[in-house]
Image (spheres, coloured by chain):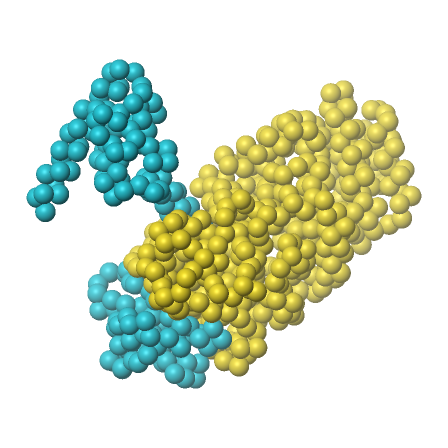
Chain colours: A cyan, B yellow
Amino acid sequence: MEAYNNEEFAVGCILSIKTTLGDQFDAQVIAFDKPSNILVLQEGVSATGPKRDIRLLKANYIKEFSFLGQTQEDPLDTSKCFLDLNRLQAREDSALRKAEIDAERFGIGVTAEAQNIFDALSKTLPVRWDKTVIVVMNEVRVSSPYLPESVVGGTPAANERVRKVLELERKRLQTRNTGQ
Amino acid sequence: MGCKKDVNGTLNDALLFTTMCIIGLPVDVYIKDGAVYSGIFHTACVDDDYAIVLKRAKMIKKGSREPNVVHGRLIETLVILSEDLVQVVAKGVILSADSIAGHFNGDNVGTACSNITYPEYTKEEVKATKLKVSTVDGEKASKERHVRDGLINKQSDRRESHESLRERTIVEVQGSSSNLDVFVTRANAIESVNFKTNSELSSNGVSRVSPPLSSIKVDDRNNERHSYEQQTLGKTPCLGPTSSGAPITSVSCVSSSSSPVDLAPSRGSIHNASTKESKLNPGAKIFSPSALQHRTATPPVMPTMAYMPDSCPVVPVATVEPEVEITPFAPRPSVPVKFVPYNSLPAGNGGLDVLYAQPTIGYMGNRTQPARYASQYHHLQAPTGYVHPNSQNVMVGRLGPLVYMHPVSHDVVQSAVGFSQVSSRPLLIPHQVHPPKHQGSTEPQALQFYMTPPVITGLQQPFTMPSIPITQASFPVMRPMQVPGSNGFLPNKFA
C-alpha cells in the first residue's frame, strides 16, 4: 500500500541522502507527500528513546541517495499517534516566551565584548539593554566602552556596586579570554 | 488514492501529523539559496504547497542571494514559501505517543487528543465504515475547531462592522441546517455548520488567497476534514495582517505571493489562553471574562439569547444548566427544558447568573461536542456584548431565530433587568421572552409582538404572557409550570 503511495520513496526505508546544499545524513522515510513533494524523514532510528530528529525535505533537493536498509515495522505507528493541541499551544507559547526573553538579552548593534559584559553582569544584577547602553537595576547606565568609568547614574551606592561588579567581570572575562 | 490527493491538494496525513508534532519546536529551515533560518515552528500552509511560518526567526546562515532579511536580526514572523523551502529540521521530536500517554487524563481525552486516522491508503475502508469515521472526524474537527475558534474570535472583533457579511454567513448556515438533520451523527451536523460558517468567514476575512476554501466540498467527509486542517494551518497565515502588529517578513524572491501573515498571534494567545486553561482549570479562566463582560454592560440575557438557537439542533445547551452537568444529555432534542433553566438564571440572578452559566460552559469545553460551543461562546463573549449574539449564531447552528433575536434581545434585557430588581418571579420573564423569539423565527411575527410588549412594559404582566401560548393552569404555581410550558412551546415552534 505504501509502495503504491510512495513510488519513489517507500516508507520505512533507511536512506543515506545528500542534498543539493551539501548536507548529508542518514534517515528513515516516514512518509512521502507527493503533492508537495516533501519527504518526511527521521534520524536517529537506531538510538534509544522516543526523540527523533525530523526532517521535512523537498524531494527535488535531493542530489543523491543510497539505500541502506529497511525496518520491519512502520515508522509511524498509527495507533500511537496523538496530538494534544493544548500541549502544542502551550509548547509554542513557552517557546515564544523563552525566545523573547532570550532576544532581550541580545544587544543590537553592540560588540561581542559588550554582550559578554552584559551576560556577565546579568548573572549578578538585573540588566537590560537600552539600545547600546546597559541599564543595571533600572538606574545605573553603562555605556560604551563599558569601562568602570563609563558607569553613570543611580544612587551612589548602586553606582559603586555596578562599578565593582563591572570591574570584576571584566577581569574575569580577561582571564577567560587569555586562558583560552 | 495518490491521485485523489493530488486533486484535493491536501497533504499526506503523515506529513500533517509530523507537522503538527513540530509546532512550537525550534527548527532550522534551509532555504533554496543555502540560507538557514532558525525559529520556532509556528504553522504550515498545507494547501497545494507546503509553506511554513516561523516565529522569532533568525538567519543563522547566509545564503547566496540577497534576502529581504537582515542577517542576525530577529524576525517576529517569517513566512517561508514553498518555492524557497528546501528542508525543515526539527530536533528531538517525539512522534509516538508512547512516552506521553500519561498526559491524557479523564474527560479531556476526547478533545485534547484525537486519534488520527491516518494512513491515507485506508480511505477505502474508511468510506465503507463511514459512520465510524465521521465520529472520529468530529472529534478531530472539534479539536481543530478550538484553534479556529481562536481565529474566528479574533476576526469577530474586526468584523463587527461587517454586519452584512455576517448575515450572509447566517444565511449560509441556515441553508445548511436542513442538511444537518439528515446527518447521522451529531458530530457531522455540527461539523458541517461550522464548516460552512468557517468557510464563509474566511472568505469574508481579509483580502487574500483563499484557494482552499473554494475547493471544499461539503459532502465529502474526508475532504471536509482536510479542509478543516487546511483552514487551521493554511488559513492562519492568510488571515492576517490585521491581527497583530508584529512585523511580518516573507523570505522570498516571489513578490507576487507575498501573503503577509499573521494570525499566528491570535491563535497563539487567544486560543491558548482559553482552551488550554479551560482544560486545566475550566472554571477559572472562563470565569473572568464573563465577569468583565457582565460589567461592561449588556446584561447576561444577551448571551443567553444567543445561546438558544444552538440548543435547537444539537444540544449542548442542555449543559447550560448550571451545575448540573455536562454529561451526556447533550445529544437529546429535549432541549426546551434546558432552556428554561438557563434563561431563568440570567434573568433572576441578574449579575451572577452569567457567571454561573459560564463556568458550566467551561466544563463543557472539555468534552468533545459541547466543547465547541463552550469555547466559541466564550470567545465570542470577549469582544463586545453586541457582537456576541451574532457571532454566536454564526458559529452555532440553527440560525433562524437568531436574526430576530437581536431586536428582541434588547427588550428582553431591559425587561429582565427591571424585573430582577422588582419581582421574585424572574423565571417567567426569560421564559416568556424566549418563546417569542422562537416563534418569530418559525412563525409569523405577530406572536412575537404580542409577547414582547408585556415583557417590556409591565412587571406584573408576565403572568399573562404564559397564558397565551399554552398553559393557563400553570399560573398558580409559577416555577414548575414554567418548565412544562416552555417545553410545550418550543417543540411546537420547532415542529
Q: Quadrant of residue B354?
A: top right
Q: Is residue B121 left or right of residue B127?
A: left
Is residue B370 visible in the rendered structure shown here? Answer: no
- The residue lying at 81 percent from left, 39 percent from top is B407
* Residue found at the very far top of the displayed protein: A156
Q: Vertically, is B249 above or below A76? A: above
Quadrant placement of the C terminus of chain B = bottom right
* Residue found at the very far right of the displayed protein: B446
Q: Is residue B225 left or right of residue B156?
A: left
* Residue found at the very far left of the displayed protein: A179
Q: Nearer the viewer, residue A9 or B14?
A: A9
Q: Position of residue B53 (x, y in %)?
A: 46, 57
Q: Position of residue B209 (x, y in %)?
A: 61, 62
Figure label count:
0
Q: Nearer the viewer, residue B230 or B327?
A: B230
Q: Is residue A49 left or right of residue B447?
A: left
Q: Vertically, is B461 above or below B63? A: above
Q: Is residue B201 left or right of residue B135?
A: right
- The residue lying at 82 percent from left, 41 percent from top is B436
Q: Vertically, is B90 above or below B465? A: below
Q: Quadrant of residue B200?
A: bottom right
Q: Position of residue B211 (x, y in %)?
A: 61, 66
- The residue lying at 75 percent from left, 34 percent from top is B430
Q: Nearer the viewer, residue A125 or B269?
A: A125
Q: Nearer the viewer, residue A30 or A144?
A: A144
Q: Position of residue B431 (x, y in %)?
A: 76, 36
Is residue B210 visible in the rendered structure shown here? Answer: yes
- The residue lying at 68 percent from left, 47 percent from top is B159
